[in-house]
Amino acid sequence: MNKFFSGWIVVCLLAMVGCSRKVVLFEGDGKMDEFAPLEAKYDYLSAKAKIVIEEESGKTTRGTLSLRAKKDSVLWFTMSPGMGMEAIRGLFTQDKIQIRDRMGKDDVNMTYLEFERLYGLKLSLDLFQNVIWANIPYSVTYEDRLVRIGRKFELTQVRDNVRYFTKVETSHGKVSEFSSNSLDDRGTVLASFPKFQDINSQPFPVEVLFKIAFQLPEGSQNTRIHVNWTSIDPNSGNLSFPFRF
């Protein structure tokens, strides 16, 4: 699998360069004394973004992302490098990852376990949903470590041999920093969410920076991904998710 295509895949963990629309920033009340993080609420959601992918080699790729989602069921996307040409279409369900690469012909059709064995990254639909919209990765249990330091809560969780570290702001109840690291050091994901926009009285990210390290057959790969969400509609009607190889 070539490095260009690998970069497009990891954007989906997700998802900044200038945005022409006026962004209304979310202003929380700053009163989260007890740990009560906010989770994005929607049944069907559609969104668009501008993305920039910076590879370890120095290559930079710019494009656009269109995303559709049905909560806890489907995450669908298309990506284009420009000129209206679709480069990649993907479908993530509870069971597997499917990617159709129209340019490189490097298609993916595998379970999350198969993906982990090949690339060293442990993924799931739930984790995608949470990381994209700055939710905590997993619900808190008694085994987790949770402390408050100033205006942030710091949460450490270990699930299935992966350590997750999350900072949640008391001002708005959303994740500002996220990291995951497999205990065997094969895969790492870092994400920062510097500011949030008000979408129907809900906080959604404006910009996101991802730093991702994963394994390829030819060696490790480090990628930076910048995302600028240009539109988010958490009240979309019943959406379709067209996909076929």
Image (tube, rainbow, N blue to C red):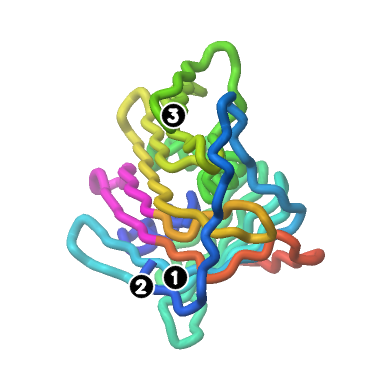
Element under disc 2: strand
The amino acid at mark 1 is: Lys
User: Is residue 170 rendered to the left or right of residue 5?
Assistant: right
Question: Where is the C terminus found, in terms of image quarters?
Answer: bottom right
Residue at the spot x=61%, y=65% of the render?
232
In the rendered image, which quarter is residue 31 located in?
top right
Q: Residues within 10 Å of mark 2 (few under 14, many from 20)?
A: some
User: Is residue 171 rendered to the left or right of residue 10?
Assistant: right
In the rendered image, residue 151, in percent from the top left (x then y), is placed at 43, 32
In the rendered image, residue 138, in percent from the top left (x then y), is placed at 58, 30
Residue at the spot x=29%, y=53% of the render?
223
Q: Gap in Å between the C-alphas at discs 1 and 3?
A: 27 Å
Q: Is residue 223 magenta?
A: yes
Q: Gap in Å between the C-alphas at discs 2 and 3?
A: 29 Å
In the rendered image, which quarter is residue 35 located in?
top right
Residue named by callout 1: 50
The amino acid at mark 2 is: Arg
Mark 1 and mark 3 lie on one chain; the one further toward the N terminus is 1
Asked if one can make out residue 88 in the rendered structure from this viewpoint, the answer is: no
In the rendered image, residue 24, in percent from the top left (x then y), is placed at 54, 65
User: Is residue 198 rendered to the left or right of residue 170?
Assistant: right
Q: What's the mark number on residue 114? A: none
Residue named by callout 3: 164
Q: Which residues are magenta?
A: 209-226
Q: How many marks?
A: 3
User: Is residue 221 rendered to the left or right of residue 50?
Assistant: left
Q: Is residue 219 above or below residue 227?
A: above
Residue named by callout 2: 62
